[in-house]
Amino acid sequence: MTERAVPDRHRGPDFPREFLAPPDPVRLPLPAPARPAPGVRLLRGAVYAVPDGSRPLEADLWLPEPARGPVPVVVFVHGGGWRTGLRDDLGPRFRHWRPGPFARLARSGPAVVCPDYRLSGEARHPAQLDDLRALLTWLRDRAGDLGLDPERVVLWGESAGGHLAALTALTTPQGPGGAATVRGCVTWYAPTDLTRLADDHAPGRFDPYDPATFEALLLGAAPAAAPGPARDASPALRVTPQAPPFLVLHGTGDELVPCAQSERLTAALRAARVPVDHVRVAGANHLWAGLAEEEVERCFDRTAAFVARHCAGG
């Protein structure tokens, strides 16, 4: 029997390098659609970025059906202390909704996009900001395939996701040929100034030198030990007059992220003459805990109305 030569799989020069390159998310096939509710088409798990050394990042797209021309887009950024969380989870107060909040919003007109991003156990700031900017670029590049209007995008996030939504809205360059155009931003009970958390918490509730806080894990060091990164990651300190309009909601009884954090962002926006609607939700704790069901509905309806107002027209 003649012995067959076994190719050396480690011989780099003879192997086409393009085979080793990561796939271009703009060219990847889109997921097969599901229909989770009447009037909604769901594409679950579309790859929008492949960061070097990391898992592929995916997004779920809730699309109105039938669509009447290119539709505006709401990008929802999940919370979880930058450490955990699911991209399609708005929190425990919404898990019983049928249809769910994203299907409900999509049926009213806009598409809803729920992306992954790298968590703090995978990469530190500004990786999360880079991921959301990559998503906005991907949305512009694939707008024609998806029936989206990349000139009408609203960012929305809750808790740590609200922080990331605000930071993305405030720092992403706008203009043709790049990222999709952000027309507005909604934050729910979000941290906005990582340099002042100890001032806003009750005495002893937050140690800015503790390397184990969620904020420290995001930054790679305690906020007090890394003042530069803490400032860079603070939306309230990144406001310019070019910022889009904001809707800022926060419960007055929030024990995890003090309501004063939203007040800092609101004050910075008003000082820059940026339109902002600041809603203090009386008695609500984090994740709208302790809030009556009709008040939770009202927070959602305020958000939907803001989206409709700032995505009007084409």
Image (tube, rainbow, N blue to C red):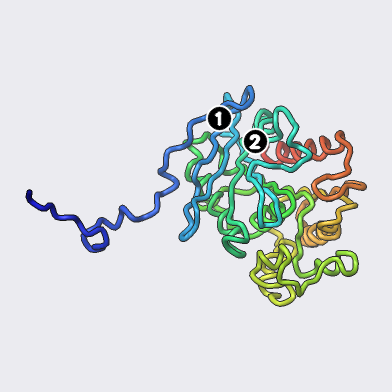
Q: Residues within 10 Å of mark 2 (few under 14, many from 20)?
A: few
Amino acid on which disc 1 is placed = Gly
Residue ranking furthest to the right:
283
Secondary structure state at the residue bearing disc 2: loop
Of the numbered discs 1 and 2, the one sitting upstream in the chain is 1
Do tag 1 and tag 2 residues touch (Cβ < 8 Å)? Answer: no
Residue 34 drawn above or below residue 268: above
Side of 253 where 165 appears, left or right: left
Residue 144 drawn above or below residue 39: below
Residue 236 location (% of width, % of height): 75, 62
Q: Residues within 10 Å of mark 1 (few under 14, many from 20)?
A: few
Residue ranking furthest to the front:
1
Side of 51 where 199 appears, left or right: right
- At 49% from the left and 45% from the top, the residue drawn is 47
Q: CA distance from mark 1 to mark 2?
A: 11 Å
Q: Quadrant of residue 206?
A: bottom right
Secondary structure state at the residue bearing disc 1: loop
- At 7% from the left and 48% from the top, the residue drawn is 1
Residue at label 1?
69
- At 67% from the left and 48% from the top, the residue drawn is 78
- At 70% from the left and 48% from the top, the residue drawn is 157
**Disc sitting over residue 313 in the figure:** 2
